[in-house]
Amino acid sequence: MDIDRQQLQSIVREVAQNTLLPLYNNVQREYKKDGSIITRADKAVQLALTERLAGICPEVLLLGEEMSAEQQQALLDSGKPIWCLDPVDGTSNFATGLPFFSISLALIESGEVKAGIVLDPVRDELFAAVRGQGAWLNDIPLQAEETGLQLKRSIAFVDFKRLPKALSSRIVGDKPYGSQRNLGSIALELCWLAAGRGHIYLHGSQHIWDYAAADLILAEAGGYAATLQGDAPFSHSLQPRSTYAAIDQQLFEQWRQYLAEAVE
């Protein structure tokens, strides 16, 4: 299905300004069964976007993070186009006042992501991509460039918490990169990778709403990504996925080789 990217971007920006940011530093938090945080903002943004998107595409239903697994699975199984939303990616940051969080929205059709938007409302940076048409940052084309860096000189985005213990211990001991960050928003970290603000990436367990939009943005910008098992990073499934990625092919191959040896 065809979408109006500019209209979609305007809707996401409007919801961020009118619904999300007014709740920043005014947080009412709860905890889910898995220990992760949910705030009033998560629920409010999901509701606002559900209503706004229904107004422009009533035939496309929305799969949001703040739904039951049964509802999410039913939407994936429907075979129909769906929106996939993380209303606040980086909720822990948002809840503690750290200014690094995003709204992540993807359009999934026929088992693949057709379009994606990741908005950083604090910096007013909107990353977007349409399959086969490219990626943009605030409507300026986003194109990854060869870094010429060796792995030992790279800046890495790594979330150790969700990696297998043996792998995380190996990486800490070896320190195969120049330095490491974990910024707390999967979607923004992948977009920052696409923008050249980091060079390699590793995460052990991402949900579809975490990575769907940003994975497309990275790919359309010319970056590289795969799971630790060697599969394509996106799966039309609720099953969490690992991802390793790099800004250019040379770094990707070095990172792939290192990780392959580390998990043997």
Image: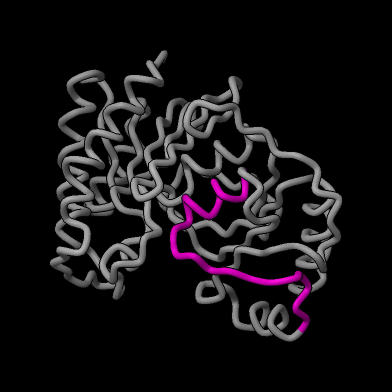
Q: Is residue 88 left or right of residue 136?
A: left
Place of residue 81 in the rendered image (x, y in percent of width and height, measured from the top left): 36, 26
82 lies above or below 174: above
User: Is residue 237 found inside the magenta-colored segment of the image?
Assistant: no
Q: Can residue 111 be seen from the camera position used here?
A: no
Residue displayed at 70% across by 44% down: 224
Q: Quadrant of the N terminus?
A: top left
Q: Nearer the viewer, residue 78 or 64?
A: 64
120 lies above or below 241: above
Residue displayed at 31% across by 53% down: 88
Residue at the top extreme, as displayed: 2
Place of residue 72 in the rendered image (x, y in percent of width and height, measured from the top left): 29, 46
- Among the 4 quarters of the image, the one containing residue 75: top left
158 lies above or below 89: below
Q: Nearer the viewer, residue 14 or 69?
A: 14
Q: Is residue 240 left or right of residue 220?
A: left
Residue interval drawn in magenta = 174-194
Q: Can residue 108 be seen from the camera position used here?
A: yes
Residue displayed at 30% across by 70% down: 36
254 lies above or below 177: above
Place of residue 118 in the rendered image (x, y in percent of width and height, measured from the top left): 42, 41
Q: Quadrant of the C terminus?
A: bottom right
User: Is residue 188 found inside the magenta-colored segment of the image?
Assistant: yes
